[in-house]
Image: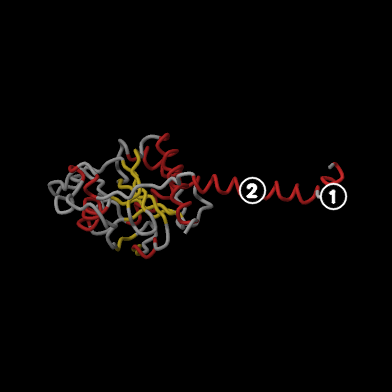
Amino acid sequence: MRSFFARYRLFFITFLSLATVIMVLFYRALQPREVLPVYQPADFNPELVDPEMSHIKKYHTVADFALVNQNGDTVTQKNYDGKIYIADFFFTTCLTICPVMTDNMAYLQEQLLDEPSVMLLSHSVTPEIDSVPRLKAYALEKGVVDAKWNLVTGDKKQIYRLARQSYMAVKTDGDGGPFDMIHTENFILVDKERRIRGTYDGTQREEMARLLADLEILKTTYERE
């Protein structure tokens, strides 16, 4: 018997190793894979959603846009084709939540600098104040990396439509004054198909950890395709 096992020792070792690998792969295949939900306008607080959109329960995507960034370049949805991105709304003269939000966006930029498939997009809600030179000065002050993060200004109505109808990120349309849009502190995670996959409190650093964890789940879903 001992001589039999000695003769086929290599065979048994190979067989056991292969069986172990197969069992591990089979076990992993049976484990439920984490998948992020796809959020629709109907999933949000109605205060954040344009009434025209509040009934939508599927197929919602971020609308086309054309805005101008801190370098005076036109930025459209095509700049984000094939990218996952994180969006928010801010203004450079804000002294309350915006500085914290911008610091947290800068933190995300640092964490994602070597991730070419992920970008950042910050919309000014006071485009009449946030000119290209002002955005450029702000970008330099905050350490914005142009290839990773666009700060955009442009037509106010377009920005408001995006906020209310695409990102569900403001509480009111306002009364037409220069500070009439009450934007939320939300960071919005958008996938490569321009669908919303998560929202996060941009004033809380611990929420950035949750965002980064969700981002890894989202990236994994693309890697499996």
> Which residue is the extreme one toward the left?
175
Relative placement, left or right, of 93 versus 35 is left
- Specify the amino acid type for callout 1: Arg
Q: Quadrant of residue 74?
A: bottom left
Q: How far apart are marks 2 and 1 (CA)?
A: 24 Å
Q: Name the residue under label 2.
A: 21
| Image spot of residue 216 (x, y percent) | 47, 47
Relative placement, left or right, of 188 versus 114 is left
Looking at the rendered structure, the secondary structure element under dot 1 is helix
The disc, 2 or 1, on the residue closer to the chain's N-terminal end is 1
Nearer to us in this view, 183 or 5: 5
| Image spot of residue 182 (x, y percent) | 21, 42
Q: Name the residue under label 1.
A: 7
Relative placement, left or right, of 12 versus 147 is right
- Specify the amino acid type for callout 2: Val
In this picture, is 135 found above or below 101? Answer: below
Nearer to us in this view, 142 or 224: 224
Q: Residues within 10 Å of mark 2 (few under 14, many from 20)?
A: few
Residue at horizontal 34 percent and vertical 38 percent from the top: 201
Residue at horizontal 75 percent and vertical 48 percent from the top: 12
Looking at the rendered structure, the secondary structure element under dot 2 is helix
